[in-house]
Image: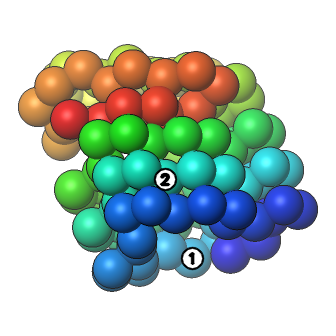
Amino acid sequence: MEAEEGVTEAKGGIPEPEARNMEGEEGITEVKGGITKVETGNIEAEEGVTEVEGGITEAKAGNMEVEEGFMEADLEEAMEAEGGVMESHLEEAVDHEGGVTEAK
């Protein structure tokens, strides 16, 4: 995991991270709800994840590139974003500001 600022605050904790090749300029700055299980590979974002209120319970992503970190997912189908294909297993929409701000 590489980040210029790194993780500055984690309220809920990150109990089981399984991430590799994560790069972000700002990195993760605040996590309120905690990330319980993340299995990601090759996530690149300019702003990174700035705030997560509800926590991410399970995310499986491969080769995801986001320039502004803007995403909304309420699907179980593949969707195209910024020239890449991404699958979402989230059951509810994700709100965000420059990254993921709330995941239910």
Rendered view: 60 above or below 17: above
Q: Quadrant of the N terminus?
A: bottom right
Closest to the observer: 5 or 38? 5
Residue pointed to by mark 1: 20
Closest to the observer: 79 or 17? 17
Outermost residue on the right side: it is 4
Q: Residue at x 54, y 40 (%)?
A: 51
Image position of 58 (left or right of 63): left
Numbered mark located on residue 31 in the image: 2
Q: Residue at x 28, y 69 (%)?
A: 37
Q: Quadrant of residue 12?
A: bottom left
Q: Residue at x 84, y 61 (%)?
A: 5
Closest to the observer: 72 or 42? 72
- Decide: few, some or many residues near mark 1? Use Cα within 10 Å; few <14, some 14-19, many ≥20: few
Q: Secondary structure at mark 1?
A: strand
Q: Is residue 104 visible?
A: yes
What is the three-letter code of the residue carrying label 1? Arg
Rendered view: 15 above or below 94: below
Q: Quadrant of the C terminus?
A: top left
Image position of 99 (left or right of 95): right
Which percent across, then down, holds residue 17? 41, 77
Q: In the image, which is nearer the foreground, mark 2 or mark 1?
A: 2
Q: Quadrant of residue 102?
A: top left
Q: Residue at x 72, y 29 (%)?
A: 67
What is the three-letter code of the residue carrying label 2? Val
Q: Are marks 2 and 1 in contact (CB under 8 Å)?
A: no
Q: Is residue 62 visible?
A: no
Mark 2 to mark 1: distance in Å? 19 Å
Which percent across, then down, holds residue 23? 73, 60
